[in-house]
Amino acid sequence: MKGSRKLLLLFLCTVLLSLGAQAFAAPYHFVFVCHGGEENTFWATVYSGMRDAAKLYGVDAVMYRPKTEGDLSWQLATLQAAIAQKPDGIITTIPHPTMFNDVINKAVAMGIPVICSNTDAPDGPKANARMAYIGQDLEVAGYNLAVAMGKYFPKGKNHVLIGVEGPGLVWAESRAHGIIRHLTEIGATYEKLDITLQADVEQSRMAAYLKAHPETTAVLDVGGLGGTAVTQVMKDMGKKPGEIPVGSFDLLPALLQNIKEGYVQITVDQQPYLQGYIPIMQLYLMKKYGFSAWDVNTGNALVDKNGVDQVVQLSRDRIR
């Protein structure tokens, strides 16, 4: 009899624990797949936004990042694997103009909502079935950076080096196109240079270019790593802060220090925290209340020496 009571008690405890686990289990599971490498601090801020939103809305969210920056084959394979698990929603970057269209269309056809974050296909919703884009208007951001940098250009004819860290990738080419649009309007000459995503290569290629082209009056980088790389080049060449003005993107810690030192004049903050936070919020509202998705332009914040102190700590806290 005692043995039967023990078995019954064990059974009841198991049932109660099971019911309790179900009661407190997250109602939705969302997956974020991106092209940003595991060591990229920018993506740590995107992750922070995703994590905070998931906590607030009581959902489960996981982010997958490649070991190698920009490994698009890995990203595509990971997206395919995520779809097979049938999550409640997917967030992904679209760093290539066509590579991800089919897999995104497949997910949406299966009833899995897909939100694009950070980087969109050039044709936007015409390219694939993604439901919204949360991120910077890349071409406009490049244009705005070039316009803002104009006050630092010397009078007369200007020749601008455009550092392109990801040739052929949507984010890099779109920003470069915006930069070129304004440089053409003001009659400046320019040259795009493939500087890769490797810091040592970026430094060597920029150093070689600046030595071969002493007529260069400014450097505009379409990423953030190039802004820090060219700062080191200028220090090695004995250039004074601001002698060749530099414009860049994002709030990498080293880049913010370069702004304080005067080697970088302006950087464009695309506010990555929002690129992680808003997609989770949208997917939650879509699943729970049937809301539609909507585009959000997260990135028009220009940061210069006057505003850099305000964002330094926020950058360390993975909010800006």
Image (cartoon, rainbow, N blue to C red):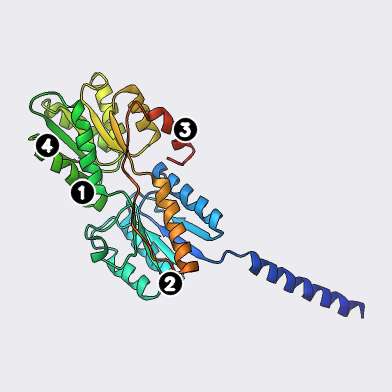
The earlier-in-sequence mark between 1 and 4 is: 1
Q: Which residue is mark 4?
A: 190
Contact, mark 2 vs mark 3 (Cβ under 8 Å): no
Q: Nearer the viewer, mark 2 or mark 4?
A: 4
- Res. 88 visible in picture: no
Q: Secondary structure at mark 3?
A: helix
Q: Which of the two discs, 2 and 4, labels the residue nearer the N terminus?
A: 2
> Which of label 2 and label 3 is nearer to you?
3
Q: Position of residue 174 (x, y in %)?
A: 21, 49
Q: Identify which residue is drawn at 45% across, 52% down.
A: 277
Quadrant location of the C terminus?
A: top left
Disc 3 target residue: 313
Q: Nearer the viewer, mark 1 or mark 2?
A: 1
Identify residue type, mark 1: Glu
Q: Please name the residue shown 30% across and 35% down the image.
A: 267
Image quadrant assignment for residue 160: top left
Question: Which quarter of the figure has residue 41?
Answer: top left
Can residue 233 be seen from the camera position used here? yes
Q: Measure the C-alpha gap from mark 3 to mark 4.
A: 35 Å
Tag 1 and tag 4, C-beta contact below 8 Å: no
Amino acid residing under circle 3: Gln
> Cα distance, mark 1 to mark 4?
15 Å
Q: Earlier in the sequence, mark 3 or mark 4?
A: 4
Question: Could you say which disc has been placed on residue 84 in the image?
Answer: 2
Disc 4 marks which amino acid? Tyr
Q: Earlier in the sequence, mark 1 or mark 3?
A: 1
Name the residue beneath numbered marker 1. 173
Amino acid beneath label 2: Ala
